[in-house]
Amino acid sequence: MIRPLTKRDVDILEERGLWKASSSLYVVIRRLIRGKRPLEIGYIKNAHRIIFETANQPGIAGKYRRDNPELKRLDGSLLEIAHWRDIPNKMAELDVELRSVTKDLKLPKTEEEYAEIVDLAIRFSHRLACIHPFENGNGRSSRLLLNAILLRAELPVVAIKEEKPQYLQAMQQADHGDFSLLWKMIVKGIIRSKELQYDIIRRKRAELAKRRRRIR
């Protein structure tokens, strides 16, 4: 007899699916950079499909919701999301804009260029979250879009999981037009990711130098 999945089982499968989706998206974006091509919403929709197919939930994998759930913010206020019938059009509009603004993205060299890309990533991510196109996994999809834009600009991805309560608060502020907390979180995350990259490079160089000394 097959044991029914517990919530922990589902969480583990979804986490595995998220890892697979992130890895797949990374490969796609490296190709886009080489070909100087833009991001498309279809890549995020496919990432959603990977997450939930891996989690044995094919009924919602990569598919738009067909209902209007009542959702509440942390403070108990009602979260306004798109009517399910409007989702395809709103996602199509988002796709057109996303393609337009990411077709010429490149590694930023000035403070202004960094600011423009962070602003772009934050606002598109928030817009996707507000549309709330899927039955489940909307937060993950919006963060995948945020990181996809950063990656397309050849910037490191940002890990949010350990700061989720602060992130939810930042998204709530963004619902009211205040992106300052979200901005600080993303900039802090980019800096932390760069520091980790530099630490890895330093360790590898130290290991290589040690091996060379042994050979001599």
Image: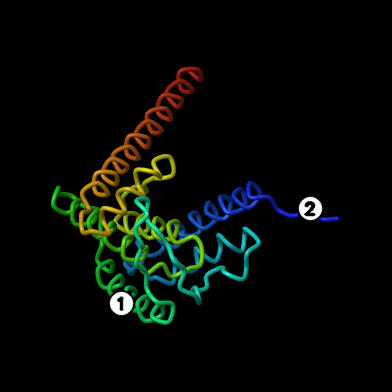
Across and down, in percent, residue 113 comes to 17, 54
The residue tagged with tag 1: helix, strand or loop? helix
- Residue 26 vs 187, above or below: the answer is below
Quarter of the image for residue 85 reads bottom left
The residue tagged with tag 2: helix, strand or loop? loop
| Residue that carries the numbered disc 1 in the rendered image | 96
In depth, the one of 88 and 74 nearer the eye is 74
**Of discs 1 and 2, which sits in the foreground?**
2
Across and down, in percent, residue 155 comes to 31, 50
- Give the residue displayed 30% in from the left and 72% down from the top: 99
Quarter of the image for residue 98 reads bottom left
Q: Earlier in the sequence, mark 1 or mark 2?
A: 2
Q: Residues within 10 Å of mark 1 (few under 14, many from 20)?
A: few
**Residue 3: mark:** 2
Q: Is residue 4 left or right of residue 210?
A: right
- Give the residue displayed 46% in from the left and 25% down from the top: 207
Q: Residue furthest front?
A: 76
Q: CA distance from mark 1 to mark 2?
A: 45 Å
In depth, the one of 78 and 192 nearer the eye is 78
- Give the residue displayed 62% in from the left and 58% down from the top: 55
Q: Is residue 47 left or right of residue 199?
A: right
Q: Is residue 42 left or right of residue 103?
A: right
Callout 2 amino acid: Arg
